[in-house]
Image (spheres, helix red, strand yellow):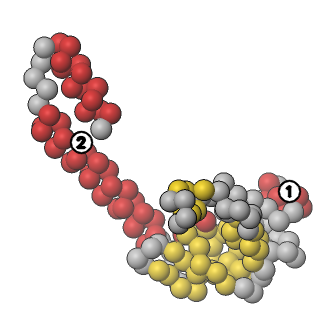
């Protein structure tokens, strides 16, 4: 919308035709193509994940300990899992943790910085309580595929 406003204002200042409908069509097509390209990239990336594959954790929510972080930083240990299922609609993978590089496992979820919808106020708000979920070796959980990377 801001692009249409700026372009229209520029055309107004320079005496050009605003061509409002043409601008709307251009930006509609632009964003539709961008969404299609983004979906295509996601589908291509997701298609490289297969049930039974070993994957490495990306530590999206941080580390359970300083020791785990140091092992990761020094390439001593990478948390590993095995894909046990795939959700082709939402691009999620179910992973069984094989090694978390720490007896406490990995942090599989942390709502810090998240916003949740409050029905009574009708607004997005910070959760009242911080929730951190850990996952230990042998346990399974669903993840966004981007939380893990395919092992070479």
Residue 38 percent across, percent down from the top left? 37, 56
Q: Could you say where residue 16 lies in the image, as x and y percent from the top left?
A: 12, 18
Q: Secondary structure at mark 1?
A: helix
Q: Nearer the viewer, residue 37 or 24?
A: 24
For disc 1, the marked residue is 70
- The residue beneath circle 2 is 27
Task: Report the residue at 12% width, 37% height from top.
Answer: 22
x 22%, y 47%: residue: 28
Mark closer to the chain start, 2 or 1: 2
Q: Nearer the viewer, residue 142 or 110?
A: 110
Image quadrant where residue 11 sits: top left
Q: Which residue is depicted at the point 45% across and 65% down?
A: 45
Q: Residue at x 25, y 33 (%)?
A: 4
Q: How many marks?
A: 2
- Say few, some or many: other residues with alpha carbon within 10 Å of mark 2 (under 14 / 14 to 19 / 20 or more): some
User: Marks 2 and 1, how far apart in space?
Assistant: 47 Å
- Which quadrant does the C terminus fall into? bottom right
Q: Say whether residue 72 is left or right of residue 4.
A: right
């Amino acid at each position: 919308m801001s692009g249409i406003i700026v372009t229209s204002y520029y055309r107004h200042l320079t005496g050009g035709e605003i061509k409002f409908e043409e601008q709307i069509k251009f930006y509609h097509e632009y964003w539709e193509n961008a969404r299609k390209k983004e979906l295509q990239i996601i589908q291509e990336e997701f298609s490289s994940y297969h049930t039974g594959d070993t994957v490495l954790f990306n530590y999206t929510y941080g580390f359970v300990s300083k020791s785990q972080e140091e092992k990761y930083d020094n390439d001593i240990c990478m948390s590993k899992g095995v894909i046990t299922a795939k959700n082709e609609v939402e691009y999620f993978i179910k992973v069984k943790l094989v090694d978390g590089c720490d007896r406490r496992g990995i942090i599989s979820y942390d709502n810090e910085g998240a916003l949740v919808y409050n029905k009574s106020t009708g607004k997005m708000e910070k959760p009242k309580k911080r929730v951190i979920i850990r996952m230990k070796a042998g346990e399974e959980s669903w993840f966004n595929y981007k939380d893990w990377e395919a092992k070479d």
